[in-house]
Image (cartoon, grey):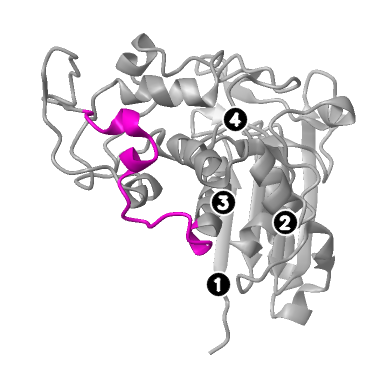
Amino acid sequence: MQDTTLDTVALENPMSLRFPLIAVLCLAPPLPAAAQDLAPAEPESVGMSSSRLAEATEALQAHVNGSDIAGVVAAVARHGRVVYFEALGQRDRETGDAMARDDLFRLYSMTRPITSTAVMMLWEEGRFQLDDPIARYLPQFADQRVFEDPGAPDLARTRPRSGDITVRHLLTHTSGIGSRSTPIYRAEGVRLRSITLPEMVDNAARVPLFEDPGTRFRYGISTTMLGRLVEIWSGQPFEEFLAERLFEPLGMTDTVFWADGERADRLTTVYRLDDGSGELYPWAIESVPFTERPALIEGGVGLLSTVMDYCASRRCS
C-alpha cells in the first residue's frame, strides 16, 4: 500500500484572534528532507488537482478580503514536491507591506512538535526510557502534591500524588501540569518571561499538580519541561541542540527563537478582531521581544519560522 501520510498544520488565531495565517499541508512519507530539497512540481505529477488547489486560493483570498485575517502563506507538498505555494494579503496592515512566501510567523504551540521530535531523537540514542520518572532527571518534581480541587486550586488544600510523572506523560499532556495562563501559575512566577528555563521549571515544580499523572489530558506547559530535559540529556542548551541536530541538517535557516537583522523585517504582525467594530488591530499575546534574545527559551512556545522550514520539519518527524 502506498504511504500517503497526511500532515496538516494551520496556525491561525484561536478563533477570537486574527493572525496572519500560515498553512502547511505535507502529504508524504516521513522521510528526512531539507527545506531546500522541497522542489516545485505540477500537482498532477503527484496525484493532485491544479483546479482544486486553485479553489484554495479563492477561499483564502476571500478571508483576506473579508478582513478575517491580514494575510496568509499556504503550501501543499506531497512526496517531497511542493505543488502549491501562495502568499496573499499583507504582512503588516499599517505599513501596507505585502505578505511574502519567506515571511516569518510566531509558531506559538506549533513549537511543540519540534520539541517532541528532539525528545524522540534522544530516546533513539538511549538517553532515557519513555516511562522513566522525570524526577530521576528533575528531582524537584519528586514530592510534588496534587490540588484537592483543580477547579479552585488552593496551595493550602492538597493531597499526596498517586504515581510518578513520566516522560510519556509529558509527551501526551497527561502529567497533571497545568497551563501557564492559570492564575495560580501567574501568582507563583511560572508565567514570568524574565526568568530562564531552569528557573521556570523550578517554579512549576513548586505548584501542585491539577490531577494525578496519567489520569487526564490537560494542555499546558508539559512540553516546556521536555525542553529542559533535552538540555539535561544532551548536555547542550535547548536552542543549541535544536540548531545543531534539527535546523541545520534540515536546512531550516529561518527557524529561530528571535528575529534579528533582516529577519526582523520579515516578521508578520499579529492581529485581533475587535468584537465591537469588527476591525483587526495589532495585538501582542504577551510582551515578548521577538526581535531580541528572550531570557526564557522553552519548548512549548517561542519559535519563529517560515512555511517551507516548518514543512521540512514535519517531513522528518
Q: Position of 184 compared to 249: left or right?
A: left
Residue identifier under label 4: 18
Query: Can you identify the residue that label 3 sits on?
Result: 118
State the SS at label 1.
Answer: loop
Q: CA distance from mark 4 to mark 3?
A: 30 Å
Which of marks 4 and 1 precedes in the sequence? 1
Query: In terms of depth relative to the viewer, which is nearer, 202 or 316?
Result: 202
**Magenta stretch in the rendered image:** 123-144
- The label number, if any, that marks residue 74 in the structure image: none
Residue 178 in view? no
Give me the C-alpha separation between circle 1 and circle 4: 29 Å
Dots 1, 4 in contact, CB < 8 A:
no
Give the CA separation, mark 4 to mark 2. Answer: 19 Å
For the residues bearing labels 2 and 1, Cβ distance under 8 angstroms: no
Q: Nearer the viewer, mark 4 or mark 3?
A: 3
The residue singled out by tag 2 in the image is 75
Q: Nearer the viewer, residue 38 or 227?
A: 227
Q: Is residue 132 one of those drawn in magenta? A: yes
> Which corner quadrant of the image does residue 47 belong to?
bottom right
Q: Residue 202: give x, y in percent of width and height.
A: 40, 22
- Residue 32, position in %: x, y? 69, 67
